[in-house]
Amino acid sequence: MLELNAATLAYGQATAVHGVSLHVRLGEIVTLIGANGAGKTTLLRAVSGLIAPKSGSITFEGRTLRGLSPDKIVRLGLAHCPEGRQVLASLSVQDNLELGAYIRSDTAGIRQDLDMVFDLFPRLRERAGQLAGTLSGGEQQMLAIGRALMCRPKLLLLDEPSLGLAPIITQGIFDIITNLNWQGVTILLVEQNAHMAMKIAHRAYVLEAGQIVAEGNAQELAGDERVRKAYLG
Amino acid sequence: MSLAWFLQNLLNGLSIGSVYAVFALGYTLVFSILGIINFAHGAVFTLGAYLTYVLAVGEFGLNGMLAGVTLPFKLPFALALLVGAALSGLAGVAVERMAFRPLRKRGADALLALVSSLGVALILVNFIQYLFGAEIYSFPPDILGDLPPAMLFQVGEEFVAVRTIQAVLFGVSLLMLLLLVWFIQFTKRGKALRAMAENPETASLLGINVDTFVLGTFFISGVLGGLSGTLIGVSFGLAGPYFGVSYGLKTLAVIVLGGLGSIPGAVLGGLVIGLAEAFLPPDLSSFKEAVAYALLFIVLLVRPQGLLGHNAEEKV
């Protein structure tokens, strides 16, 4: 479904990702783990069009994403839930969710999905009229995920959904990610919390200093001595 | 200091202040999405006034390139106002393409955009002077058709005069303000605009085309500029191609006074300065142009962020 082929990504002169190849198949949860600064976020940013690859290719459903701006890429069915949540603080929770459906115009379907998100995160329903900036960190994460779902993505890119959250809330978020996957959403999950990510993922890639150093079945990889030592402590 | 005196000044202040507010919102919209003051806004204000004049009166002045040219038609004032405003909106779009987009695409410093917008302002003003000449234009007294120039209301022993033009100023401005608030608060595109003002990157991830919205914002800003130029022009005349520049500077005081980037701030700032000018004692009237800046300095001493501005707080 998503395929990166020898993608090299850079900010100006500083290369962050060196010739990485990876793929995500329809229906999978694939996780990308690695230390801070390994290039995980950069990789997601390239997929959603926020940065242009220096070389190599990125394709989605067989179609190259080269030269497409982020707002075009969303329309292909690829939602990016960015690092640090990035909710629109000055807008209400409901407005945030409705803007998640910006690319759609089927009013009835949007209503329905709004209800679906509210069922998924009842806290958001209680706070629908509140400004997003006043939510707690966990609630903001729920909002960010809910907002990404509002465009009915085929592939959801999640960047560090556990960042800064209490373990119990993280557990809840991960349960929901698993649930979404059962409902048919393909997921590419970037996490520092490798332990939890490996538990819910089908396959995993380990990124180190901009290169993939290990990949494979998540359970097998979790058993790998090197990976255990470096990331699962 | 009678009631009639008070009401008369209140009326004068609100009517001119509401135009300042509309003009100021043109700056505010652009500032809130790009974080840049568009110095060409004053030139678009001038352009709007001249365009409406020509469309409504049908002829150009005496010493410009187009001196003696007459249009085959004359539009009714209301229609000329609308067409003039729409053309000003297009001028706003041109300003964005010329002064802002090329720099934005290169990720240039905001200061450079400021300088280039100043350059576009000069080009525009000189272009206006070239075409329309440097003389003063005045709308003919019957520009509003058969409406009486003013209506008198008795208050106690005295009279309060409501000039028809004042009513037009206030009515049109109020309508524009309400339209704008409705658009920004309640429509999908208005919400997208707010999203972009807060975080362009997140907005783009939601499918919002940033370039289109920047262009749209400049269009609306140009409409507001051209419209307020016409309103001031029809009330006080068009004192040459540079007349927008002084209003442009004064309106900068309005937006800083109200709080940079704040929409309610721009409206409040416009009304405050309009009222302050109106209530200025007659023997100080030669200081009228200084009122805005004097108020600005006083307010900034007490509230550096302006009346309704707030220091950005970021939640990590």
Image (cartoon, coloured by chain):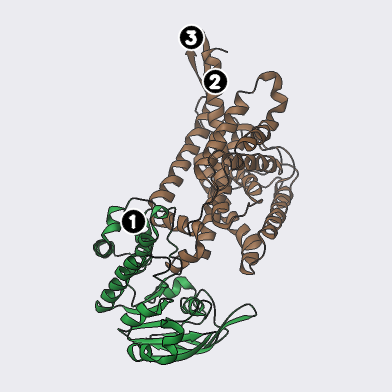
Chain colours: A green, B brown
Which chain does the residue under circle 1 lie in?
Answer: A
Which chain does the residue under circle 2 lie in?
Answer: B
Q: Nearer the viewer, residue A110 or B240?
A: A110
Residue A132 lies in what quarter of the image?
Answer: bottom left
Residue B123 lies in what quarter of the image?
Answer: bottom right
Where residue B310 sits in the image (x, y, percent)? 53, 45
Name which residue type carries label 1.
Answer: Gln
Q: Nearer the viewer, mark 1 or mark 3?
A: 1
Residue drawn at point x = 69 percent, y = 40 percent: B246
Looking at the image, tell me whether mark 3 or mark 2 is earlier in sequence order.
Answer: 2
Where residue B51 sits in the image (x, y, percent)? 61, 46
Q: Which residue in the structure is indicated by mark 3?
A: B156
Q: Mark 3 to mark 2: distance in Å?
A: 13 Å
Q: Which residue in the structure is indicated by mark 1?
A: A94
Name which residue type carries label 2.
Answer: Gln
Residue A150 visible, this orientation: no
Q: Mark 2 to mark 1: distance in Å?
A: 45 Å
Which chain does the residue under circle 3 lie in?
Answer: B
